[in-house]
Image (cartoon, grey):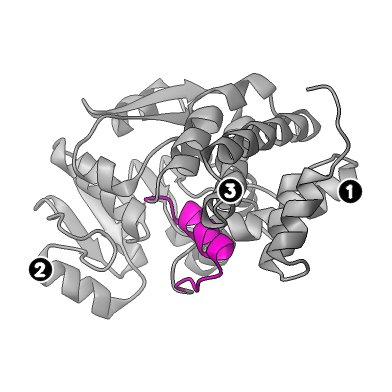
Amino acid sequence: MIGVVGAGAFGTALAVALARDGRQVVLWARDPAKVAEIRQSRRNEARLPGVALPQNVTVTARIADLAGADALLLSVPMQALGGFLAEAGASVSAGWLVACCKGVDLATLTGPAALIAAARPGAGVAVLTGPSFAADIARGLPTALTLAGGDAGLQRLLSTPVLRLYLSDDVAGAELGGALKNVVAIAAGVVIGAGLGDSARAALMTRGYAEMQRLAPALGARPETLAGLSGFGDLVLTCTSAQSRNFRFGLALGSGKGFDPSVTVEGAATAKAVTNMARKLGIDMPITAMVAALIDRQITLPEAISALLTRPLKQE
């Protein structure tokens, strides 16, 4: 049995994809009323409209129902992961605990793998990340992801004919790629929302990728990992599609429009955390700092654009 913690769009999509391939899946949601609604309709219309849950997906609000899973996919927002692990206690145990969230925890300035390892010493910890939209996974469209820290058995357990997982032993690199691309995606959305054009977006993506490459070695990651699915692949997807919540948030910032506060935007907290980390490490990350300052309203959009365009000319 595979347990999925979190009935948001991505968690629900993973449950659907794995169950469609014949596995028994338990999908956990915190809200009993939401669970009752999903059970009755066999749909999660609020998060993943138009997708029916296979009959071999059991939906529950009881953490105890996750006991005995071969793997638990932790698909809760990054900033909620630590709280969930503390609340769940020993109830959250499995052969593998797999982080499916992307970002940096504001309280500890660590990624999800370190949070899980600290809460569950000795547990098998892996990270599932890469270029993917929940709607594509749920519809059975071909998707390739990175499974960092896992083994061949876990790879087989979580792979399907259209969901291909590639193993990596660079957990830090996979986490950083998934976290930092969200920050660059917000900036890309700002560029398009402000009407600066696709050429400016391409330049922004390229310089954002350079920032990712600068930070990686300082945090024990391999720069080449960021050239793979969990870095470059996810960056391209997230910076170029309105399906991305981070990109849509940036669009709203750039165009001066409001944004639904109920929508999780992982890159917002990550920008703040990484700006603090980069400052302590002495690493220049102007795009990340600009995003953090914009979100906190420390600068205006014209000031942010001017600051980036007036930086000293230098060799690429």
Which quadrant would the N terminus be assigned to in this image? Answer: top left
Q: Residue furthest bottom?
A: 33
In space, the residues marked 1 and 2 are separated at their CA atoms by 50 Å
Which badge, 1 or 2, is on the more N-terminal residue?
2
- The type of residue carrying mark 1 is Lys
Label 3 sits on a secondary structure element that is: loop
Can see residue 149? no
Badge 1 crowding class, 10 Å Cα cut-off, few under 14, some 14 to 19, many 20 or more, is few
Which residue is drawn at the image coordinates 64% and 46% (left, top)? 114
Up/down of 223 relative to 133, above or below: above
Q: Which residue is mark 1?
A: 280
Residue 205 percent coordinates (x, y): 60, 36
Image coordinates for residue 95, horizontal then vertical, percent: 41, 40
- Quadrant in the picture for residue 223: top right
Q: Main secondary structure of the magenta part?
A: helix
At mark 2, the secondary structure is: helix
* Three-letter code for the amino acid on which mark 2 is drawn: Ser
Residue position marked by numbered label 2 in the rendering:
41
* Residue 124 at least partly seen: yes
> In the image, residue 169 lies at what x, y percent?
57, 23
Q: Which residue is mark 3?
A: 196
Residue at image position (90%, 41%) is 282
Labels 1, 2: front one: 1
As drawn, the label of residue 60 is: none
* 12 relative to 87 in the view: left or right: left
Disc 2 from disc 3: Cα separation = 44 Å
Q: What's the amino acid at mark 3?
A: Leu
Mark closest to the chain's N terminus, 3 or 1:
3
Mark earlier in primary sequence (2, 3): 2
Q: How far, Cα to Cα, is label 3 from label 1?
A: 32 Å
Mark 1 falls on what kind of element?
Answer: helix
